[in-house]
Image (cartoon, helix red, strand yellow):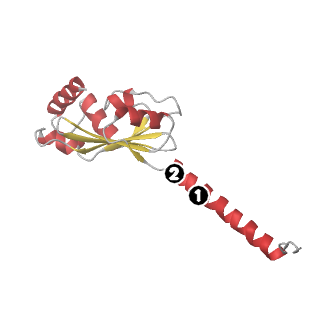
Amino acid sequence: MQKKKRFGKREYFLALLALVILVIVFIIYSYYTANKVINCGSDVDCFVARAQACKPAALSFDFAGNLLEYASSDNCVLTKKIASVAATEPDSAKELFDGKEMNCFYEKNNLNTDLIYYLGKTLADCQGDLVDAISAVKTGMSEIDADEIKVYLDEFYDRT
């Protein structure tokens, strides 16, 4: 009969080291997979579900020729951006809104979906140059033609 080989200290150390490395790789993989930005395309339901859970997601859609981009983050911040204004919109609207964005803050599982469905309806928890542009139009304090922009916003709200 042959004697069983016993593992020495070196073999135990290498096995333990391999196990530790596997655990670290799994933890790193889980972290990056859990916090990966999911591109929801134009699927609002996908975006709302992830945003409610404060998980990173992206949403973009064309609204009457205007490209809107939204993003949610793992720290419960909703970013809304007017990536481009339609060529058919007035120059004053393009100047005021093109490329502007805002960050809106909310609590996990308590996202007011008006933040997603309406561009400027709920601005109390938001900040950024898009908030400033919308506020300027709402108060009529814009240096450019405020009446023209108000018509633009009214039409925009009617389309949502």
Q: Nearer the viewer, residue 89 or 140?
A: 89
Any part of residue 105 in sight: no
Q: CA distance from mark 2 to mark 1?
A: 8 Å
Q: Nearer the viewer, residue 125 or 74?
A: 74
Give the amino acid at mark 1: Ile
Q: Nearer the viewer, residue 109 or 12?
A: 12
**From the viewer's perspective, is 77 left or right of 26?**
left
- Identify which residue is drawn at 40% across, 28% down: 113
148 is higher (above) or lower (below) than 31: above
Bin the neighbour count of mark 1 within 10 Å (Cα to Cα): few under 14, some 14-19, many 20 and up.
few
Quadrant of the rendering where the C terminus is positioned = top left
Locate residue 44: give its quadrant.
Answer: top left
Locate residue 71: give its quadrant.
Answer: top left
Q: Earlier in the sequence, mark 2 or mark 1?
A: 1
- Residue 25 spot, x, y in % from top left: 61, 61
Q: Most extreme residue toward the top, as rendered?
A: 158
Q: Secondary structure at mark 1?
A: helix
- Residue 13 spot, x, y in % from top left: 78, 71
- Identify which residue is drawn at 20% across, 39% down: 66
Label pair 2/1, CB-CB below 8 angstroms: no
Bin the neighbour count of mark 2 within 10 Å (Cα to Cα): few under 14, some 14-19, many 20 and up.
few
Q: Which residue is mark 2?
A: 33
**From the viewer's perspective, is 102 left or right of 137?**
right
Any part of residue 159 in sight: yes
110 is higher (above) or lower (below) than 98: above
Q: Residue 28: give its label.
A: 1
Give the amino acid at mark 2: Thr
Q: Residue 90: give its label.
A: none
- Residue 140 spot, x, y in % from top left: 23, 30
